[in-house]
Image (tube, rainbow, N blue to C red):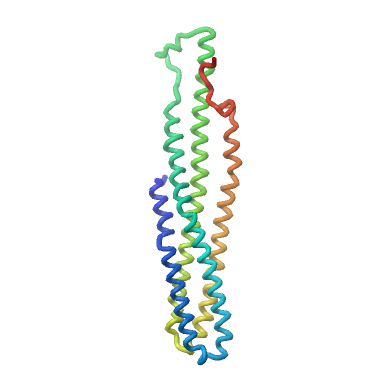
C-alpha cells in the first residue's frame, strides 16, 4: 500500500502549477483579443463570426477558472484526509492487533475452577471479540477515508489535465500572432476545440464526483459500526464491575 507521503505527493503534483497555468491561459486569451481589436476595423463584418467564438472561449475559460478556485479552497482538507486515513490504521488498528491474547497452560487461569474461572473465561472471550471488532472498524474507517481521498486525487489529476490541454490549445491557435486572414479561422477552430475539450473534461469530472458522492453516502455504514454486540453500550466490556 502506498504511504501517506506518496499519495500526498501524487495529489500535490496534480495541484502544482494549476494557478500559474490558469494565469497563462488568461494572458494568452487577452493577448489574442488585443490583437483582434487592433485589426477590428480591417476585419469588419468578420467580427460577427469572431465575437461569438470569443464568447464561447471566454465562457469555457471561466468554467475552468471556477473549478480551479474551488480546488484551491479545498486543497488542505484533502491532504488532511490522506494523512488521517493512514493515521487510523497506524494509530488505531495496528496497536489493537497486538492486544489479543490466547489461553495457555502456563497461565494461572488454566488452573482456575468454579465461578471465578467461568467469569474470567466470559470476559476473556468478550474482550478478545471487542479487540477484533475495534481493529476491523478501524480498517473500515481508514478505507472510507482513503476512497474519498482517492477520488479527490482523480478529480485534481483530471482538472490539471484539462487546464494543460486548454493552455495547449491557446498556444497552438496563436491568435495573438495570426494574420488578418488567419484570425477568423484561428478563433473559430479554437472555439470548437475548446468547447469539445471542456465538455469531455467536465463529463469526466462529473463521473469522478458521482463516485465521490457515493463514497460519502456510505457514512451510514460508519454509523452502523457504532452498533456492535461486541461493544455493549458503545463501550468496552469491563472485566470487573462494581
The one of 91 and 139 positioned closer to us in this rendering = 91
Question: How many discs appear?
Answer: 0
Q: Which percent across, then down, holds residue 181?
A: 48, 89
Which of the 4 image quadrants contains residue 12? bottom left
Q: Residue at x 44, y 69 (%)?
A: 23
Q: Residue furthest bottom?
A: 42
- Residue 89 position (above or below residue 239): below
Q: Residue furthest top?
A: 114
Q: Residue at x 54, y 77 (%)?
A: 191
- Residue 242 position (above or below residue 182): above
Q: Which percent across, then down, holds residue 105?
A: 42, 13
What quarter of the picture does the C terminus occupy?
Answer: top right
Q: Residue at x 50, y 57 (%)?
A: 155
Q: Residue at x 43, y 59 (%)?
A: 15
Q: Which percent across, then down, holds residue 135?
A: 49, 33
Q: Which percent across, then down, holds residue 214?
A: 59, 49
What quarter of the picture does the N terminus occupy?
Answer: top left
The one of 232 and 143 positioned closer to us in this rendering = 232
Amino acid at each position: 500500500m502506498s504511504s501517506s507521503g506518496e499519495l500526498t505527493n501524487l495529489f500535490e503534483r496534480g495541484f502544482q502549477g494549476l494557478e500559474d497555468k490558469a494565469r497563462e491561459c488568461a494572458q494568452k486569451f487577452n493577448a489574442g483579443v488585443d490583437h483582434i481589436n487592433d485589426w477590428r476595423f480591417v476585419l469588419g463584418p468578420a467580427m460577427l463570426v469572431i465575437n461569438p467564438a470569443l464568447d464561447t472561449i471566454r465562457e469555457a475559460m471561466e468554467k475552468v477558472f471556477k473549478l480551479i478556485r474551488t480546488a484551491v479552497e479545498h486543497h488542505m482538507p484533502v491532504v488532511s484526509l490522506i494523512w488521517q486515513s493512514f493515521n487510523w490504521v497506524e494509530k488505531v488498528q495496528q496497536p489493537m492487533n497486538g492486544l489479543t491474547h490466547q489461553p495457555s497452560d502456563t497461565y494461572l487461569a488454566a488452573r482456575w475452577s468454579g465461578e471465578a474461572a467461568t467469569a474470567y473465561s466470559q470476559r476473556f472471550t468478550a474482550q478478545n471479540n471487542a479487540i477484533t471488532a475495534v481493529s476491523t472498524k478501524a480498517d473500515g474507517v481508514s478505507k472510507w477515508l482513503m476512497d474519498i481521498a482517492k477520488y479527490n486525487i482523480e478529480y485534481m489529476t483530471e482538472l490539471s489535465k484539462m487546464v494543460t490541454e486548454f493552455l495547449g490549445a491557446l498556444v497552438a491557435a496563436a491568435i495573438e500572432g495570426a494574420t488578418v486572414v488567419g484570425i477568423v479561422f484561428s478563433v473559430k477552430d479554437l472555439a470548437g476545440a475548446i468547447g469539445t475539450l471542456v465538455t469531455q473534461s467536465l463529463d469526466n469530472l462529473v463521473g469522478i464526483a458521482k463516485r465521490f458522492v457515493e463514497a460519502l453516502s456510505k457514512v451510514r455504514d460508519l454509523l452502523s459500526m457504532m452498533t456492535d454486540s461486541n461493544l455493549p453500550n458503545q463501550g468496552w466490556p469491563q472485566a470487573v464491575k462494581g
